[in-house]
Image: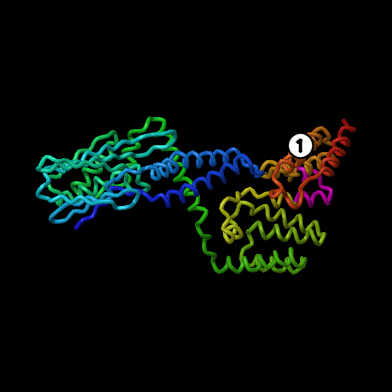
Amino acid sequence: MIKIKVQRQYSIFLSIILLFAIFLLIGVLLYFLFMSEVDLNSKSKSDLHEILWILAFVLVPFIFCSIGNKSEYVSDMIISSEYIELVYKQKQKEIRRTRLSRNDIELFEVIANIDKRSSGRTCYIQSNTIVTIELKDKNQIQFSQDSSYILCGSPYKFILDLIKNSREIPNFKYEINGNYEFAKKDIEHYRIYKKRLPYIEQLKHDYKNQPKFIKILHLILIIVLIGNLCFMGYLCMPAGKLTKDEQEYMKHYNQAIELRIEQKQYQEAIYELNKAEEYFSDTAETYLEKAYCYDRLKEYDKAISAANEGLKYIDSKSIYRKYHNFKFMGKKDISLYTLLGKLYKKTNNYEKMKLCYDYVIGNVKYKYTNAYFQRGYAKYYLSEFDSALQDFYKHKEIIQQYINDQREEAPEFKHTTLIYDENDLINVEKWISACKKYK
């Protein structure tokens, strides 16, 4: 015995629950769109509008259709070796059955109309299958299956089930109409091989029948998706395994960092860095840390010497970056140059200080840099007042941009520690006034 589901309708009780849930969701979305104090950006509002549109277009009509349909319908078809039985329901309740002897069936004809339809930005497949059973006594039974009642799965699954069991149906005949050509190929393939075409074939068919500009958009989308997948794969790649010497180097290096930052023990940190150098002496990070320590100890000549030594290895392979699995830190590291600029400032070497900040400005990616102020400071003491004035103006512009950005930023995203405030603006104005005196 074979049971084929013709179509399923849902009870009024279930439809009311779904309707309540849908209206509740619509109400929540409308609240966020028009009543809530949450400041939504234009993209978020567009997404909410899209969700509302989909709910209105797809779900609400289905529920009203389910509630309002009071006519009887064929819900199941049961095929046995002796008869074909049709089960009629009304509002999900069985009301009668019609049993037809296989010997009495003159013709079992199925006509399926399968169309691809568009509504706004949504495309969907609509299938309507009409079954006509002619009996030898010239009586005729006719019923239809409509994909309007299908929430998931193939919209033409019913005709596929009939074809699958066609040998059990006497005098079976079918016809496929409509504008969706892929469905015709899919059904014919199913008839021959008892399996459907791969989903990729449907994508290919739909792609071929798209306008040229849509094909280009799809191609761009595919390239972007593949690029994103490759990018995410690259980000998720684990760090390379450290060699034994690299592990020893990082052990001493990390210990030096802890001693310098947390315990303020600068001599001990330098000792650990010297131990790290026994394994690798060609890393810029080691000399940068040494320079920091000497700076805290106010041994500026040693700090400058260490920083300059580190510049020799600024483009060398970094064990530190390998250890932390950094993906996008470029070779043009400005840390050594920034520290050198500060050290030259403390030792009144303004010419070299200016050169350091020339490099920083040429390679900095930070929006709110103070490198222009520092370079202007060096130029001021080198009596390059016109050039210093331009740097101070640039720094003033950066401060004003930062303050404006802070005002516009949502409270939860504001910096807990401000980079600049009104006092910095007053300070740079003083330097601008000082430069103007010598013009």
Task: Give the vertical position of 148 relative to 17 (above or below).
Answer: above
> Which of 18/41 is in front?
18
| Stretch in magenta | 340-355
Q: Position of residue 82 (x, y in %)?
A: 12, 55
> Which of 59/14 is in front?
14
Q: Position of residue 299 (x, y in %)?
A: 81, 60
Task: Give the vertical position of 38 relative to 268 (above or below).
Answer: above
Q: Position of residue 138 (x, y in %)?
A: 11, 39
The image quadrant where one finds the N terminus is bottom left
The residue that label 1 is drawn on is: 397
For residue 390, side relative to residue 145 (left or right)? right
Q: Main secondary structure of the magenta part?
A: helix
Q: Residue at x 84, y 34 (%)?
A: 385
Q: Position of residue 346 (x, y in %)?
A: 83, 51
Task: Give the vertical position of 44 relative to 11 (above or below).
Answer: above
Q: Residue at x 44, y 46 (%)?
A: 226
The image quadrant where one finds the C terminus is top right
Q: Give, as a three-letter code, the residue at label 1.
A: Glu
